[in-house]
Image (cartoon, rainbow, N blue to C red):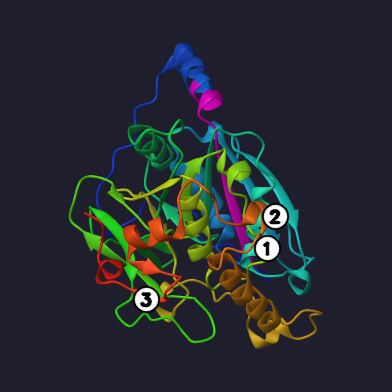
Amino acid sequence: MCRSADAGGATAGGAASVTPARAAGAEGALANMGRSMSQRIFVSIASYCDPVLPFTLQRAVATAADPARLHFGVVDQSPPAGARVAAPAPARTSQVQVAPRDARGPCWARALAMSLHDGEEWFLQLDSHMDFEAGWDERLVQQALALGAPARPLVISSYPDAFAFEQGRPVRRVTTGGVLAQVLKADAAFAADHPVLSFQAVPVDTPRALPAFHVGAGCLFAPGRITQDVPYDPWLYFHGEEQALALRLYTRGWDLFHMPALPVYHLYNDAASGAPSRPLHWDEQQDAGRDHAWWTLEQRARARLAALVAGADLGVYGLGRERSLADFAAFSGIDYANRSLAPGAFVPRL
């Protein structure tokens, strides 16, 4: 049975942050309402038997500069006996519940969550175990606007810094006040039978946003039109999903960025997290009794990624025509056609 972590308390161990000022009185309420309606944020969350989901929803609302602008689209893959989880008012929640035995992996759930988008101006995809700095919503919007969105199609993304629970309270593990830039891991190499690669986030001490050639599926912010232009591929599974999304975005003319002081934190599933244990979709016990084994889904996903980089016609889930794979290779150092990795793929874009 999923349990809720303590949603209260101030965070410790992180950099101080300032909540953007809110207008006071009736005029302030009207101003905030107008801003909410013109800068609404859809928050897509796919959760799998996650006891930290209630904490994530509560913290997102409690720390938002304007919680009325938030619409959460939650795909909760938990036992049917579990209670429905919703974000606190004034945020809105749309939810789909799926029994764990019927779940078909993270990408399938994320595609389903994306389908709950209801015309909001902004789209934020998150994992179900996150913490937030005060004013996170305003900071994401302002950074995107500063980079030229929404007229300019762009994505702000990375692997966030960690947080953990200590005595039931969230504590941030901040590595930098600058940028977390995604690069290939030092030992990354193309395997003989699939194109999946491993990435990591490295701290860069800079106050400005940096160009990116990869994305983090658990923390991705973009104009809401991404739901129509680059819909999530439900036929992927987990490994390689970020590569596929980065390629589809880049070749369709979307620019990728890492922002400084990313105001979102991720609870990594290890012994140091201090959180209740949570199962993973591919755990042997979870996989037992399913009609579709996780390894079958994984093999299908690897074949689909290989087809994507080979230029196969995957319809709306395929590559775009604004930029080519050769353009991506020149920009990122990752050459899928020749299965080679240049030194630039292992260092940030400065």
Q: Position of residue 150 (x, y in %)?
A: 46, 32
350 sits left or right of 168 in the view: left
- Secondary structure at badge 3 equals strand
Q: Label 2 belongs to which residue? A: 112
Q: Residues within 10 Å of mark 3 (few under 14, many from 20)?
A: few
Please give the name of the residue rendered at 37% of the width and 47% of the height, measured from the top-left corner. 133
Occupied quadrant, residue 237: bottom right
Q: Label 3 belongs to which residue? A: 340
Q: Nearer the viewer, mark 2 or mark 3?
A: 3
Proximity of marks 2 and 1: CB atoms separated by less than 8 Å: yes
Q: Position of residue 207 (x, y in %)?
A: 20, 46
Of the residues under marks 1 and 3, which one precedes in the sequence?
Answer: 1
Q: Amino acid at mark 3?
A: Ser
Cα distance, mark 2 to mark 3? 34 Å
Please give the name of the residue rendered at 35% of the width and 70% of the height, measured from the top-left corner. 200
Note whether residue 287 is visible: yes
Proximity of marks 2 and 3: CB atoms separated by less than 8 Å: no
As drawn, 273 above or below 91: below
Tell me where the magenta segment starts and ends, as one range.
35-48
Q: Label 1 belongs to which residue? A: 108
Note whether residue 280 is visible: no
70 or 237, which is in the foreground? 237
312 or 186, which is in the foreground? 312
Cα distance, mark 2 to mark 1? 6 Å
Occupied quadrant, residue 76: bottom right
Instruction: In the rendered structure, find residue 318 and report the number of the disc placed on it.
Output: none
Proximity of marks 1 and 3: CB atoms separated by less than 8 Å: no
